Amino acid sequence: MGKILDTIDFPKDLKNIDLQAMEKLAGELRKFVIETVSQTGGHLAPSLGVVELTLALHYVFDTPKDKLVWDVGHQAYVHKILTGRKDRFHTLRQYQGISGFPRIDESEYDCFGVGHASTAISAALGLAASRDLNKEDYKVVAIVGDGALTGGIAFEGLNNTGAAKRDLIVVLNDNRMSISPNVGALSKCFTQVITGYWYNKIKKDIWELTGKLPKGSSFVRDIVHRIEEGLKSMVVPGHIFEELGFRYFGPIDGHDLNVLIKIFTEIKKLNGPILVHCITKKGKGYKYAEEDATKFHGLGSFCPETGNSQKKKNPSYTEIFGKTLVQLAEKDPKIVGVTAAMADGTGLIHLAKRFPDRFFDVGIAEQHAVTFAAALALNGLKPVVAIYSTFLQRAFDQVIHDVALQKIPVVFALDRGGLVGEDGPTHHGNFDLSYLRLIPNLVLMAPMDENELRDMMWTAFQYKDGPIAFRYPRGAGPGVSLRKTFEEIPIGKSHIVREGKDAAMLAVGDMVIPSVQIAKKLEERGISVRVVNGRFIKPLDKEMIQDIADRFPVMVTIENNTVIGGFGSGVAEILSEYKDKNIVLHRFGLPDRFITHGNRCDLINEIGMDEETLAQRIEDLVVGVRNKKKK
């Protein structure tokens, strides 16, 4: 007998199979996802946890007329397979292949592009509101993970939806992996219930009655206590959402297809804000992902038989950062770490294990993380906010208003700076040098290798005059031997890596070492190039820039950041002050567009930032200046 999956290309094909076949299909989908992601890498555990939920949604609802909005989207792999992309699923996250996240330009079934957490409810409400204004008739469903509910925008969406009373369904995919017990406002409503007059009066009366029993009172009281705790766990979640204006259904087993289909079929007939609470298991059906859902949340290629990931030769910048932070924290008890639900991803897990009381995971709440850290610093601590470059964009106002304006010495560690590769435009850290460079009172650095990252960390914790940030790329560094000691870097000072006379290259971060290789290529072509490691994006080394303007006819800047407003723009601004200098300046960086997903080398080649292309373009500049002088 052939696979049922072979007969499924679009959601309409699900209508032709029975429940037993659907359950078999769920197993085939899990195997298909595991086999593919083991080759491409990706977000495995989240997608395995929603197989039955995805099947039930597409079976009951009439997609793409009915709209499914996936929060974050990293759990939407099965959705992609069921919506016409099965034959292309092997290209997942690959260059010119399908994205790892829903994208409106990829499929009509992807009604809203996502990639960052907590946005689905707001987007779904917008779709519902426009549907009503256009007098259209379809259902809108937002599928939200429990971790996304720690994000402020999710609560804003819930609040507005409940008040608007629009026809909208929110499916809470609760895998109990992200929300910490008794943290935040979710526990406030629970507290109101258990401290209320009637709740406590009933509890008191029952307690006193059982206490009067002559025998077995302790046993009865224990039973009453267990019943009380069970009732709390069942009643309180619904109470929270009912208070926000939703009709609450659940919790239900998110892996029981029969129950899911029945509930969604009935809910589809109802109107108004509805929340369906589904309990799922992250990594369901693959024992390695079930046992370590954090590791299998997002990973590179791995062996499906053993679950072992392919080992990288050199440690990643993330690992260097995490272990160095522990080393520094052992010497300085004031150092603390703050992250927004990315302890493993940012390397802060090392600090969490070594000094758990000096580690703060605030959930998916980047704005809160920054302001929280500012207050920590005001009380004499030395907080480092470790966060992905693309996620810090969400806290831009807090960096300006709550930190920089007050000159509070918060340290920002920006992971995944520049192109990140397969996760694509929602995760590329293309803009941090630009959006941070414009902020007063903030120092911004980028290391050329692992030792310089360690030195920048040391420098950052010595700096007292305001916030300081350093950004570094995803993946492994060049593999230099790590020094045991640290060196403080003078603020705003670059250094010459290689001398030359025909042109000067000023590079920052992970573009410094490629610049050295470019200089070697140019030397073979009779062009001598000075290579400068800029180190600082703000403040820039004006003395170095002026020296280059005095001595060189050609200057180029190279950065793994958008060419608009970044390191090169800063150099151009300084050169504009030297109106008597006759120098050709060219800025190389990421183009002014959103860059697709794919292997980083493929992306570098596509945008013309590979070493050979840059070498040729610099050669053309130098030859052009030489020819102009001859004339």
Image (spheres, rainbow, N blue to C red):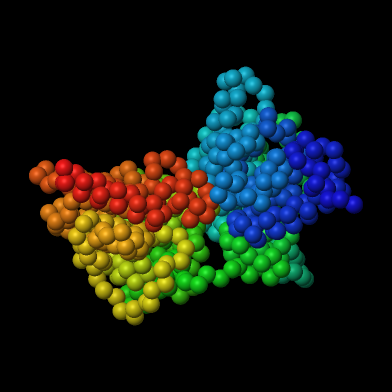
Residue at the spot x=32%, y=62% of the render? 524
Residue placed furthest toward the front: 631
Res. 208 image quadrant: bottom right
Q: Residue at x 70, y 54 (%)?
A: 33
Closer to the camera, 500 or 352? 500
Please identify the quarter of the rendering in which residue 369 is found: bottom left
Q: Position of residue 120 (x, y in %)?
A: 56, 40
| Occupied quadrant, residue 176 | bottom right
Q: Is residue 194 above or below residue 16?
A: below
Q: Residue at x 37, y 69 (%)?
A: 450
> Is there any visible trace of residue 490 in the rendered image?
yes
The reply, left or right, for residue 390 in relation to residue 304 is left
Identify the residue at horizontal 34%, vertical 72% (top origin). Answer: 451
Residue 274 vs 252, above or below: the answer is above
Where does the image place residue 173, in percent across and percent down from the top left?
Answer: 65, 49
* Number of numbered callouts drawn: 0
**Residue 299 left/right relative to 23:** left
On the image, the x and y values in percent for residue 481 come to 38, 77
* Left/right of residue 549 with respect to residue 330 in the rendered view: left
Q: Residue furthest bottom?
A: 484
Looking at the picture, tell me which residue is in the foreground, 388 or 520. 520
Indicate whether 472 appears above or below 597. Answer: below
Q: Is residue 145 visible?
A: no
Answer with left or right where residue 518 lies relative to residue 259: left
Depth check: 212 or 523 in front?
Answer: 523
Residue 330's spot in the image, x, y percent? 37, 77
